[in-house]
Amino acid sequence: MKKYIGWTIFFLAIVGLAIGGYFIVANLDTETFQFKEVKTLDYNDFTLHDFVEQDIVCNDKACTFKDKDVIFTISEVKELGPQDVTLKLEYEGEKFEKTFHVDVVDKKNPEIVLNKSAIIVDLNEKIDTASYIAEVTDNYDTLSVDDIEIENNVDLKKAGDYEVVYTIQDSSGNVGKSVLKVKVKGEKEVISSSDDKKEEEVVEEKITLNYDVSGLFNDSGTLLQGKAQSLVNKNIELGWNNTLKITSKIDTSGTIRYIISKSKITGNELTPIGGKGFPVISGSKVSAGKEASFEYTFTEEGTYYVSIVVWDEDNDTVIKKDFCLNLSVSEEVKDMKIVTEDKGSYLVIDCDYIGGGDNTYYFVAAIADSDDPKALEEEIIVTEGNEIRLYYTNGYYYNIAGMLFTLDEELVMMESIKVQK
């Protein structure tokens, strides 16, 4: 029994950057690579994807295109402003070179790291706000603690909750901010006093996020507010289960947002909430100990950035877990599944499969095992028109073997399914 099936090519074009500039091309085979015309680049935050139209998969070790290595270099960028950036590529023995005239800009905020996130002090106690600064960093400028502006809103004469706000600005106008929460303790308010001695204590107000990822890939963990998290890269071949499922829980009330974007998600993209281009897919306010969940089904290959973000009441990010997902479909037949449709007195047997490029295959179905006596005595799987049919008898089971062959009768995939009516 044979059924010929056409093949659909899965593809995705990565969204390009703004068009502009000029370029020089050497040894360029346009059927292999097409280059973007790049107008601007973010300083120290650009990759091969910013220059090439094709869907090249990169991880921490190497880059590949159609499962073959891509060797490349990008000329060093040491300063901001208009300049030439040269990209050199080597792929399957071919060498390509292109020079882009671009404007290199700095869009990354400097960062202020505090050695504490919150403190408790007594009434009329002095606070050395600068002593809580651990370091300041920036991707381009050399900044120091002396460049930080400190806004001290603490009233040490009145019990209550306050904030000390630290801000710093780099030469490109990017602003970094950190906040120290301060609790001024009232005269009759005792936090802990085993020996009746006054002592400064850290307020245990950090939010804990528990997350669980399943479906497309599995991952789980617990994140604590203020703990740095690195970007996790995963290379995944799309199959039948392309749904990403995330369940999150925090130990205090707040807002959990799930974000999926084709561009790398940075702090600048996340403020203000509801602003133009804000890539929030789903978000909800949750109470302490309650779960928030989210599902997203991928239908095309490409590079996606996924974030789980917890927000405080002032819309500042307090916890963020990032994933970079490089989704691809194999050129060869990657997966096949047998599908059936009950027509009352018979089953229509068919198959779905993924990959394969422009190739054409035919599908064969046969009884591998059954307790139906007729399965041994007569042909109960027949081809009628464009359908493969199984004429079954209620109460018996049928193990159906499905096989996918090339036109040269080479077996490329086999699966089985058990049905009983």
Image: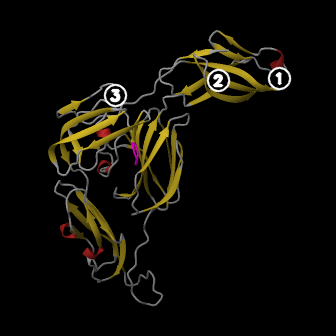
Q: Name the residue under label 3.
A: 32
How far apart are the alpha carbons under marks 1 and 3?
55 Å
Tag 1: amino acid: Asp
**Magenta segment range?**
58-62
Tag 2: amino acid: Met
Q: Mark 2 points at which residue?
A: 403
- Whole-percent x and y of residue 24? 19, 32
Mark yes or no: residue 276 visible: no
Specify which label sits upstream in the sequence, 2 or 3: 3
In terms of depth relative to the viewer, which is nearer, 356 or 97? 97
Mark yes or no: residue 379 visible: yes
In terms of depth relative to the viewer, which is nearer, 149 or 181? 149
**What kind of secondary structure does the magenta stretch mostly adopt?**
loop
- Whole-percent x and y of residue 194? 48, 87
Q: Considering only vertical position in the picture, is 406 above or below 107?
A: above
Q: Which mark is residue 372?
A: 1
Asked if residue 228 lies left or right of residue 416, the reply is: left
